[in-house]
Structure formats: C-alpha cells, structure tokens
Amino acid sequence: VEILVEKDPLVIRWSNPAPIIAKPAAVLTSAQLNAIAESQTTSYETLSGTYTYSPPLNSLIDFTSNSTVLGVRFEPEDINNFKGCSCSVVLGFEKPPLVLTSAPQTIEYGVELEESVFLYDSNQLPPGGHFDFADVIGKQLAVGATVVSLRYHSPQLLLYHEYCEVVFPIEVVPAESHITWKE
C-alpha cells in the first residue's frame, strides 16, 4: 500500500496597500511589502520562511502608470509539510497637489506687470516648470486689492498634474503725486 501525503496548502494574506503620493525618489517600504503566509489546515498559523518581493524592498517606485503590481513568493522553512506559494497586489498612486504660497505684493498704480512682481517659493514646485505670463505681462491693474491667477506648467506630468492655478494677491496703491511749480 502506497500512502501519498499532500503538502499543506498555504495562503498569503496581503491586502492592496493604501495609495501613495507620487514623489521623486519614493521607494517601496515594509508598509507596502507586508505579506503574511499562513497554513490553511493549522488554524491559519503564521509560518516561518523566506519572502521574495518583486520589486524588492527599497526599490524606486515607477510612477509611469496609475498603479503598479507588487508580487511576493513565499518559500516555507518546513518544505516537508508545506509548499511555497505566490500572491500579488496593486499599489495605487495619487498625484500630489502643487502647493504654492505667495505673499501679497504691493505695487504702485501705473506700473506694468512683469515677472518680478510674482514672488513664490520655487522649492514648492517641481523642477523645470514655468509660469505662463503671456496674458499678464505689460498690463496695468486698477487701484485696490486684486488677485492674478497664473498657470504653472510642469514637465513632470507623470508625477504631478500638468499645471496648477496659482493665485497671487496684489495690492495696487495710488501713485505718488509730483507737483512742480513754474516760477
């Protein structure tokens, strides 16, 4: 009589990780790579063994699509009673908002708008982008508080939105009067 003993089937418990914010040099961490192998026949006991992730821990994340597939292969220490298994999940991405702070600027009435009026913190923007000043350069604003909205275009379309609207508060003050007398 020949007795064939089947190896205990395993299950990998691994949920899709929460979407992450796309940013340069983002790497996979244990927050995304956290699979757990369990035995189906021993009350879902967690097993010892080797997890091989694809892509591996600390890999740069590829943001060229809206998500990426993460895979794991588990090889149990006890190969006499258990056989290895594989699983995959999807890691989603979210584009970060382009945040820009601009301090209110004061200009004198009659001054034509130029790029230097629009002050901003370039560290808050993705590198290599530019503002579209075409519609505002050379214009004069009326006296009072106003806002000028400009688009910042980003070449990093996969990591960031194509552009964002940036609001620049501007206070236009009356020009100083200069009176001259003829003698």
Image: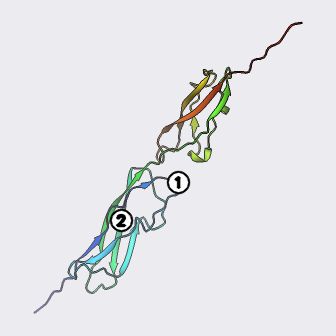
Q: Say left or right for 153 vs 6.
A: right
Q: Which residue is mark 2?
A: 71
Which kind of residue does numbered mark 1 sit on? Pro
Q: Foreground: 81 or 89?
A: 89
From what the image shows, is residue 112 above or below residue 123? above
The quadrant holding residue 86 is: bottom left
| Residue linked to disc 1 | 24
Q: Secondary structure at mark 1?
A: loop
Q: Dot 2 lies on which element? A: strand
Question: Picture coordinates of residue 69 (x, y %)?
Answer: 36, 59
Colouring method of the image? rainbow
Q: Is residue 178 left or right of residue 12?
A: right
Which residue is at the front of the view, 23 or 116? 116
Q: Compute the Cα span from label 2 to label 1.
A: 22 Å
- The three-letter code of the residue at mark 2 reads Gly
| In the image, farthest residue toward the top | 183
What residue lies at 58% left-to-right and 28% top-to-bottom?
Answer: 145
Q: Can you give x and y, in whole percent of width and height, for residue 95 in the image?
A: 44, 48
